[in-house]
């Protein structure tokens, strides 16, 4: 039927766009993407495509009203030597900490809801990094989320992956780039117990990257695992 053909074409387009986004993220990260992270992304894209093909999702995308979908968060953490490329930046059991710390505050806005399975956000963030050096950082980073998890009825969980632009007030030895302007990335997992109301807890890799030499020498970048809380308003 014509309607089914249109539906399948949309599904195919979404899957292709998903893989294109993964490719762009790997390009921008400047540190590559670990095989485990790539496998997870592939699984999420295929799961979304399967759900679309089965007609399980509503037909349409909704733009979030301006007065809704706001959140204010703050996190703190300490830089590590491990990289995103190796996957070790995501493994707390192997972290080798550096004498760099971060305190950070970010204003997040939900922009678009894709069938309730994924959402587009953007975040404006200001951070203070201290330790061996002292400087400020600000970034603007759009991110895409994955919303449904099997345990959401017990603990509401959301995963985020974001790519944007970061600027520091000083060039830092932490970044190994000699640049103020670099790419920013967000790798985040957020949980929101029902009893917490509008509050949530999140863990994040706060990442800066040269994006394969786009910003300074190839190989520059930093990773700061962080833990924070977020207050959601305008819901």
Image (spheres, rainbow, N blue to C red):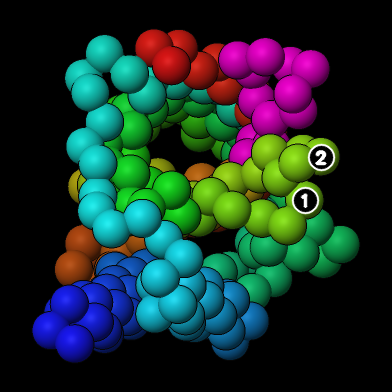
> Is residue 201 located in the magenta-colored stretch of the structure?
yes
Residue under label 2: 154
Q: Which residue is drawn at 59% across and 53% down?
A: 148
Q: Residue at x 66, y 55 (%)?
A: 149
Horizontally, residue 185 falls left or right of residue 82, namely left
The residue nearer to you, when weighing 31 against 45, is 45
Q: Quadrant of residue 59?
A: bottom left
Q: Position of residue 111 (x, y in %)?
A: 26, 36
Q: What element carries label 1?
A: loop
The residue nearer to you, when weighing 13 against 225, is 13
Q: Position of residue 48 (x, y in %)?
A: 45, 71
Residue under label 1: 151
Q: What stretch is highlighted in magenta?
A: 190-202
Quick check: marks 2 and 1 in contact, CB under 8 Å?
A: yes
> Is residue 1 located in the magenta-colored stretch of the structure?
no
Q: How far apart are marks 2 and 1 (CA)?
A: 5 Å
């Amino acid at each position: 039927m014509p309607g089914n053909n249109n539906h399948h074409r949309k599904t195919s387009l979404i899957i292709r766009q998903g893989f294109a986004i993964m490719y762009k993220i790997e390009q921008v990260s400047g540190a590559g993407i670990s095989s485990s992270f790539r496998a997870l992304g592939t699984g999420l894209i295929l799961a979304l495509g399967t759900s679309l093909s089965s007609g399980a999702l509503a037909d349409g995308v909704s733009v979030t009203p301006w007065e809704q979908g706001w959140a204010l968060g703050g996190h703190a953490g300490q830089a590590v030597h491990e990289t995103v490329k190796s996957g070790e930046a995501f493994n707390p059991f192997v972290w080798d900490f550096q004498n760099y710390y971060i305190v950070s505050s970010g204003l997040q806005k939900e922009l678009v809801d894709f069938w309730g399975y994924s959402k587009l956000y953007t975040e404006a963030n200001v951070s203070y990094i201290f330790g061996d050096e002292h400087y400020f950082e600000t970034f603007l980073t759009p991110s895409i989320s994955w919303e449904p998890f099997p345990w959401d009825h017990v603990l509401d969980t959301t995963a985020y992956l974001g790519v944007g632009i970061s600027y520091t007030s000083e060039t830092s030895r932490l970044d190994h780039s000699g640049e103020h302007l670099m790419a920013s990335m967000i790798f985040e997992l957020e949980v929101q117990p029902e009893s917490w109301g509008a509050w949530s807890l999140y863990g994040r890799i706060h990442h800066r990257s040269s994006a394969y030499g786009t910003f300074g020498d190839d190989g520059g970048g930093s990773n700061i695992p962080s833990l924070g809380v977020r207050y959601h308003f305008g819901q």
